[in-house]
Amino acid sequence: MKTRKLGNQGLVVSELGLGCMGMSDFYGGQDEREAVATIHRALELGITLLDTADMYGPFTNEELVGRAIKDRRDQVAIATKFGIVRSPEGGWNGINGKPEYVHQACDASLKRLGVDVIDLYYQHRIDPEVPIEDTIGAMAELVQQGKVRYLGLSEATPATIRRANTVHSISALQTEYSLWSRDPEDEILPTVRELGIGFVPYSPLGRGFLSRRFTSPNDFSEDDYRRSSPRFQGENFYKNLQLVEQVKAISAEKGATPSQLALAWLLAQGEDIIPIPGTKQRKYLEENVAATEVQLTTDDLNRIEVVAPKGVAAGVVYRRRHRYPADITLLQEALTNSRRSQPN
């Protein structure tokens, strides 16, 4: 496993990370024993970046990660997040970026994780009621206190990223990016590259769709939030399945799976990109890690561009024109209307 820099402040991690969210929430069918075994296998395979958040579970995913790395702390960089507030029952309690909450949330995460310091601390969503300078100022205090090493943002606009970076250097920006969700190419990627900020794509496999493991909307369990997502419903599902079939044809020529081709494509977009595919099973983890061995030529990348150009996916991700604040609106609706709802 090769390593890559996340930002210019000194954080170096494996070129692939592991998203741990699904081990505790949103996708149904949790198995803690297998989840812990998956984390241990990830470390054996050279993955050094584990991604979690206080709202996953809610609260239980950090505890799970903490138990899994208790005797292996020196092998891993832990990334966690604050800002999306959920009740213990999993309901929606809003977004909070107030400085006092930043300190409270960090202390609670440290306790759940069972660690003395968080390697990468993200603001999970931007609070429109609190100036970003105030939130980042509080996060900078955490760095000064030795509770956090590096700072990150998740789902922030270019203007917000710039303002945040003037208060304290931002090491990583996390947002959705994959073959079927390429919006970051417009403004986000140019902005973070200009500022020397690393980019962490979540849902790099299109929330699992690009894995080609689903043949019908009925493949999702009743408590899987994807049942309520437009891209996974009705005609959209089958149109998107056609896209995956074309990706599969190219991947077969490379001796790879569709998942591996999708991850290899992301890795080929720049040395500053560290995808965090999520899985809760060792067999899929091992498949994902093998993507680092898939070498794509310029010809391969051009062919992928033809079959999966920007905007190719059927069905909206967000119901408004812009990602912000529609992302928060969708998140709120999902958490309010279902038992286990919308992810990261």
Image: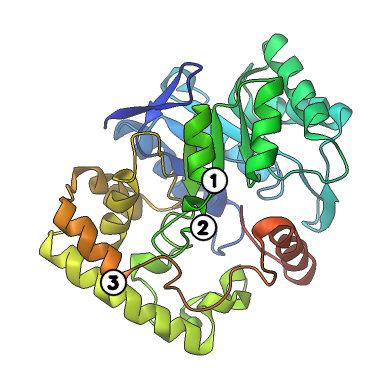
Contact? badges 2 and 1 (CB < 8 Å): yes
Q: Is residue 25 above or below residue 2?
A: below
Q: Position of residue 86 (x, y in %)?
A: 79, 50
Residue occupying image coordinates x 53% and y 51%: 23
Residue 224 showing in the rendered view: no
State the image quarter where residue 62 is shown.
top right
Local packing at callout 1 (Cα closer than 10 Å; few below 14, some 14-19, many 20+) is: many
Residue on which disc 2 sits = 183
Colouring of the image: rainbow
Q: Position of residue 238 (x, y in %)?
A: 41, 85
| Foreground pick, 264 / 228 | 264
| Foreground pick, 303 / 145 | 303
Residue on which disc 1 sits = 188
Mark closer to the chain start, 2 or 1: 2
Mark closer to the chain start, 3 or 1: 1
Q: CA distance from mark 3 to mark 1?
A: 23 Å
Give amino acid for label 3.
Val
Local packing at callout 3 (Cα closer than 10 Å; few below 14, some 14-19, many 20+) is: some
For residue 52, side relative to residue 38 (left or right): right
Q: CA distance from mark 3 to mark 2?
A: 17 Å
Local packing at callout 2 (Cα closer than 10 Å; few below 14, some 14-19, many 20+) is: some
**Secondary structure state at the residue bearing disc 2:** helix
For residue 187, side relative to residue 108 (left or right): left
Give amino acid for label 2.
Asp
Tell me, for residue 307, which label it has, or none. Answer: 3
**Secondary structure state at the residue bearing disc 1:** helix
